Amino acid sequence: MARVGFIGLGNMGGGMAANLAKKGHDVRAFDLSPEALERAKAAGCLPVASAAEAADGAEAIVTMLPAGKHVEQVYTESVFGAAPPSAILMDCSTIDVATAKRVAEAALAKGLTAVDAPVSGGIGAANAGTLTFMVGGSAEGFDRAQPFLADMGKAVIHAGASGTGQAAKIANNMLLGATMIATCEAFLLAQKLGLDPQKFYDIASVSSGQSWSMTSYCPVPGVGPDTPADHDYQGGFATALMLKDLRLAMEAAADAGADTPMGARAAELYEKFAAEGQGGLDFSAIIRMLG
Ligand code: NAD
């Protein structure tokens, strides 16, 4: 078992650090929030006083922070100066592709190996240790990161070079945002044309319109499996987080010169829904705005 520095013990990082401790790792945990540090201590981690202290002497360092600016600051101001050259650095936050690449290049210049390893799966999966990790970095970086990520998840996939983990994450979530809106529209149209939503589900779920948004995450209450729609759109994947990922996708598309008209429309609609004060609701609640 290894000494692991864990920085960012929020909704996601708290459960992930706890799972590393449960697997027997010596987890040195840091967060700016004293409450988060208390929770990490109760979960078997050793709270430390700074990000540099978490990185000092660690074989592996995991960060789970809000956005690119936090990640870049923590690595350049704390981790790079303290991590031993043998350490593997894993950023599991969802951030912009450009920052992810910049951090990996800066790590390399210091003789360190860093990978971007964002996750699919929400707070429930973080707590249960069933996240999916999509990893961008060298083959050697992936091989070194893999055992640690496997201790926090059910699947660890090498996406390609630095930044491609983030690219996979935002392209996937752009697809999800667009299919969720299309699924909502289809149910609303079917209903206006006199079709019972359950009947439409029975037909479309075994026809070519089927998607994960329909059969695993149906936005209509009482139809399909149990989803946030059945709980007044509480829990699940917050609209604000979907909007964050769509903004990152639009930024990356502009940088790469990619034309993404459906993604752009999904981003506009989620901007509008969040601006109506619905950012805390599950993202499938957008059916209420479209109806
Ligand atoms: P969160 O806001 O709950 O946690 C972030 C934590 O980072 C907070 O505890 C904060 O105090 C800490 N932090 C901020 N700056 C810091 C610094 N300089 N040093 C140390 N700690 C610092 O966010 P979250 O929901 O845990 O999400 C973390 C990342 O995971 C985000 O990038 C998010 O987009 C991504 N993500 C979240 C979910 C989800 O369902 N919540 C799912 C997939 C991916």
Image (tube, grey):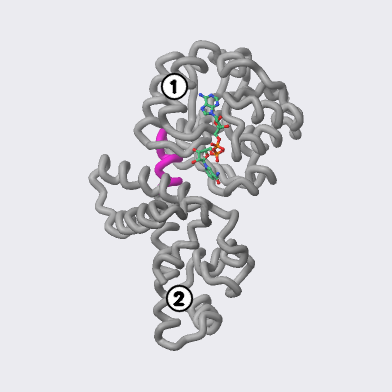
Along the line of sight, the residue nearer the viewer: 185 or 89: 185
Query: Could you tell me residue 94's position as x and y percent?
Result: 47, 39
Whole-percent x, y for residue 199 in the image: 53, 84
> Where is residue 222 drawn, in percent x and y?
60, 74
Q: Nearer the viewer, residue 163 or 74?
A: 74
Q: Quadrant of residue 193?
A: bottom left
SS category of the residue bearing label 1:
helix
Categorize mark 2 by other alpha carbons within 10 Å: few (<14), some (14-19), many (20+): many
Which residue lies at the image location 48% right of the left edge and 67% below the top edge? 211
The answer to whether residue 201 is above or below residue 120 is: below
Measure how far apart labels 1 and 2 are at the Cα level. Answer: 45 Å
Of the four image quadrants, the one with ligand 1 is top right
The kind of residue on which mark 2 rests is Phe
Mark sitting on residue 73:
1
Viewer-side residue, 115 vs 211: 211
Label 2 secondary element:
helix
Going from the N terminus, do you reach mark 1 or mark 2 first? 1
The question of residue 241 being in magenta is answered with: no
The quarter in which the C terminus is drawn is bottom left
Q: Is residue 207 visible?
A: yes
Q: Which residue is mark 2?
A: 187
In percent of width and height, residue 33 lies at 60, 27
Q: Residue at x 46, y 27 (%)?
A: 71
Can see residue 3?
no
Going by the image, does 138 lie left or right of 149?
left
**Residue 81 — which label?**
none
Q: Magenta region: which residues?
A: 161-170
